[in-house]
Amino acid sequence: MKKTIRLEAIDPVEIYGTGNRILEALCGYFPKLKVTARGTEIILDGSEAETEEFEVKLNMLIERRLHKTSLTPYDVEDIFDGETSPERFRLSGDSTIVHGNDGKPIKARNRTQQEMVKAYFENDLIFAVGPAGTGKTYVAIALAVRALKNREVKRIILTRPAVEAGERLGFLPGDLKDKLDPYLQPLYDALGDMIPQKKLQDFMADGTIQIAPLAYMRGRTLDKACVILDEAQNTNLSQLKMFLTRMGRDAKFIVTGDATQIDLPHKEDSGLLKGIELVRKIKGVSAIFFTDDDIVRHHLVSKIVKAFDRYSEAGKQDNP
C-alpha cells in the first residue's frame, strides 16, 4: 500500500536531520519499506503493517523533538530499544537515562546498574556500594541530570568527604576550592559528559548545581533536589546521619561508596555499611550492591581488583 505523511508545524530538517541522517536511521529499521521524502511529505510504499509501524515511530520522533533542542540518530535507536517514561524503568531498568553532549544515550550497562536505576524511581534514598569501576557514581549523576532536565528537581547537589588519601590539604597550593577540586574532579568529569560546558558553568554560577565537601552540608535542609554523597565509605556514622537528615521535601538522595577503599585513619570508623544496616528496612530506602563482575571499565580492571582482593584476604596487606 501507499501512504503520504505530511509534516505540519515542524521544519522537516529537524526530523530528517542534516544530510537526512535521522531519516536514514529510521528507514534502516524498515528495509522492505520504500520511503521517499519530498519537502514536508514522506511517501511510504510497502506492507500495511510496516507502513503503520513507520508512522507510529515517526510520530514518536516528532513528539520527542518537542522536548529536546534537537534530534540525533541515537534518538531513533532509543525509540526502537524502548526508551519511555519512568514506568519502564520501574519494570526493567533497561532504558536510556540521559543523553550526553554528543547525543549518545547514557544507559545502564549491566543488570546491577539497571537495578540501581529501577530503585531510584521506587525510593527516595538509595545506597549504591561496590568496587571502583562499576559506574555507580556515573549512573547516580546521570539520574540527577535527568531529573534536572525533566524539571523533577530544582537543584543537583554533589558532595564528598574531604578525606586525604596519603596527602594533606594544607600542603596543596591555592585557596579552599583549589585544594578541594582534585577530590571533586570525578564529579566534574561526569557532569561534563552530560551538560555542555557553558551551561554547566551557568548552572554552577547560579547554584543550580552545587559541588561541595560534606562538612558544608551541616545545618541545611535540601528540598526539591537530587543530592549525591560520593565516597561515603570515608564518612563515620555521625557524618552519615548528618547527611541523611538533610533530606527535605521532594528530594532524592543517592549514597555511593566502596567499602574496600576506606581512607580513614581507622577503617573501622567507616559508617557506610553500618548505616545501611540501620536504615535499609525502612520503606523508601534501597541498597544496591555491585561486585567485581559489574566493572565496566577496561577488562583488565576487574582482574586487577580481584587480584588485590585475593592478596588482602590472604592477610598479606591491608586493602589498597
Image (tube, rainbow, N blue to C red):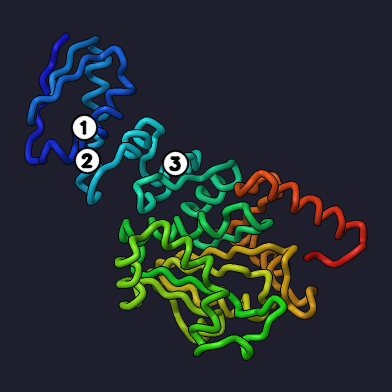
Q: In front: 60, or 103?
A: 103
Tell me which residue sits at (68%, 81%) in the image: 167
Which quarter of the image is occupied by the N terminus? top left
Q: Position of residue 258 (x, y in %)?
A: 68, 62
Would you place residue 82 above or below residue 255 in this image? Answer: above
Amino acid on which the number 2 mark rests in the picture: Glu
Left/right placement of residue 167 relative to residue 156 reads: right
Q: Position of residue 260 (x, y in %)?
A: 75, 63
Left/right placement of residue 13 relative to residue 191 reads: left
User: Which of the two labelled residues, at mark 1 and mark 2, occupies the earlier sequence position?
Assistant: 1
Separation of residues labelled 1 and 2 (CA atoms): 18 Å
Would you place residue 72 above or below residue 223 in this image? Answer: above
User: Which of the two labelled residues, at mark 3 and mark 2, occupies the earlier sequence position?
Assistant: 2
Res. 23 image quadrant: top left
Tell me which residue sits at (43%, 49%) in the image: 97
Amino acid on which the number 1 mark rests in the picture: Asn
Residue topped by disc 2 = 63
Q: Point out which mark residue 20 bears.
A: 1
Mark in front: 3 vs 1: 1
Q: Point out which mark residue 95 bears.
A: 3
Amino acid on which the number 3 mark rests in the picture: Ser
Mark 1 nearby-residue class (10 Å; few <14, some 14–19, many ≥20): some
